Image: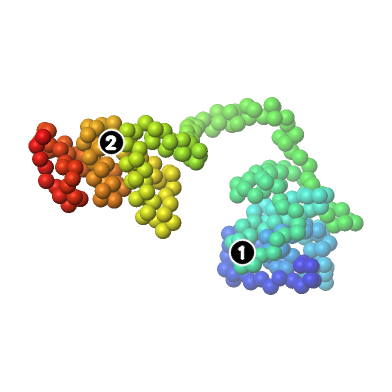
């Protein structure tokens, strides 16, 4: 119940009566589906948790029903747990429950955080195997405390009392009895490369400017690249990827004079593009041997003269 003493208004899908788990529970105990509805509304909070106190459940829904005794309520709870409609767990010395697949039964747009302790981690997994649903047919029925109405944890089975080292060969023996089965090979996890730090990128940029024979042209093209942005700034990573690294590779594989002419053409045209430099250098290589560009020619004068 919320702190203000009012119950949450919840709606239930009429088709829930035909749910396989509900039908299975009703076939064994006629009042089990009715108890399931009572747990959903109004006992459960917005996260599907409720206090599994037998006397509190009876007072909330069966105060004037003499047939619904605490023992029968407990039997219905155990049945709902066996068909996986609820999960029961113990926390801080008290018993609590959680509606299985809560979001399948209810959808809250503005849920209130639960004030009850969460269930154990193994109950949060969809296919978890815990002491509540392992070998239940061999367990004695749970007892109740007459004074508090709390559930008592059933006895542990012999398998649960076994030490871990005694259960090491149990799975192997079971596989041999069933004829054995192949184990699927584990997939190797792909390695994740962490991004380089800004210090490493700046060090790479400084190294390129120190090793190149044309640092002034490199810086001029970098200024043109930064001018394309509104802030007139360019990130070091983008500068390296778009301009400096391609230019370094081109400088190592291209004739020195042709590469210089390509850089000068890119700076004169204001095009910070390594592909433009490559095409200009290739154009310079196709010129006749001994041909040079006239120094006093303007930017539009493309005449060539023989030395």
**Who's the residue at 34% across and 45% down the image?**
220
Of the two numbered discs 2 and 1 on the same chain, state the one appearing first in sequence: 1
Question: Can you identify the residue that label 2 sits on?
Answer: 250
Where residue 71 appears, x then y in whole percent? 81, 58
x then y, percent, for residue 287: 12, 38
Left or right of 123? Residue 292 is left
* Residue at (42, 38) in percent of width and height: 205
Quarter of the image with the C terminus in it: top left
Which image quarter is the N terminus in?
Answer: bottom right
Quadrant in which residue 249 is drawn:
top left
Q: Which of 205 and 161 is in front in this view?
A: 205
Colour pattern? rainbow
Side of 108 where 118 appears, left or right: right
- Residue 167 lies in quadrant: top right
Q: What element carries label 2?
A: helix
Residue name at image x 63 percent, y 27 percent: 169
* Mark 1 burial class by Cα count in 10 Å: few <14, some 14-19, many 20+: some
User: Whole-percent x and y of residue 17?
Assistant: 61, 66
Q: How far apart are marks 2 and 1 (CA)?
A: 65 Å
Instruction: Judge the density around disc 2: few (<14), some (14-19), many (≥20) Cα neighbours within 10 Å.
Output: some
Res 205 visible: yes
State how many labels appear: 2
Local secondary structure at mark 1: helix
Circle on res. 144 = none
Q: Residue 26 placed where, x, y %? A: 66, 62
Most distant residue in the front direction:
296
Q: Mark 1 points at which residue?
A: 105
Q: Is residue 241 left or right of residue 86?
A: left
Which numbered disc, 2 or 1, marks the residue closer to the eye?
2
């Amino acid at each position: 119940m919320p702190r203000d003493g009012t119950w949450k208004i919840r709606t239930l899908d009429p088709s829930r009566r035909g749910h396989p788990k509900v039908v299975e529970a009703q076939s064994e105990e006629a009042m089990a589906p009715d108890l399931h509805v009572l747990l959903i509304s109004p006992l459960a909070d917005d996260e599907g948790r409720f206090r599994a106190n037998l006397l509190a459940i009876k007072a909330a829904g069966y105060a004037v029903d003499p047939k619904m005794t605490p023992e029968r309520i407990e039997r219905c709870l155990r049945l709902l747990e066996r068909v996986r409609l609820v999960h029961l767990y113990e926390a801080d010395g008290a018993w609590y429950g959680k509606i299985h697949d809560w979001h399948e039964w209810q959808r809250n747009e503005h849920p209130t955080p639960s004030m009850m302790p969460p269930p154990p981690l193994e109950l949060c997994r969809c296919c978890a195997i815990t002491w509540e649903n392992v070998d239940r047919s061999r367990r004695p029925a749970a007892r109740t405390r007459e004074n508090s109405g709390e559930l008592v944890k059933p006895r542990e089975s012999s398998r649960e009392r076994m030490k871990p080292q005694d259960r090491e060969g149990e799975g192997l023996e079971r596989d041999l009895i069933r004829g054995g089965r192949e184990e699927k090979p584990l997939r190797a996890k792909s390695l994740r490369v962490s991004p380089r730090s800004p210090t490493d990128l700046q060090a790479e940029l400084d190294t390129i400017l120190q090793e190149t024979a044309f640092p002034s042209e490199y810086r001029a093209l970098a200024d043109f690249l930064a001018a394309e942005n509104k802030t007139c700034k360019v990130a070091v990573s983008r500068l390296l990827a778009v301009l400096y690294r391609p230019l370094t590779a081109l400088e190592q594989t291209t004739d020195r004079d042709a590469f210089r002419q390509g850089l000068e053409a890119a700076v004169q045209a204001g095009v910070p593009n390594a592909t433009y430099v490559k095409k200009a250098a290739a154009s310079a290589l196709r010129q006749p041997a001994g041909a040079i560009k006239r120094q006093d020619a303007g930017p539009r004068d493309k005449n060539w003269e023989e030395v």
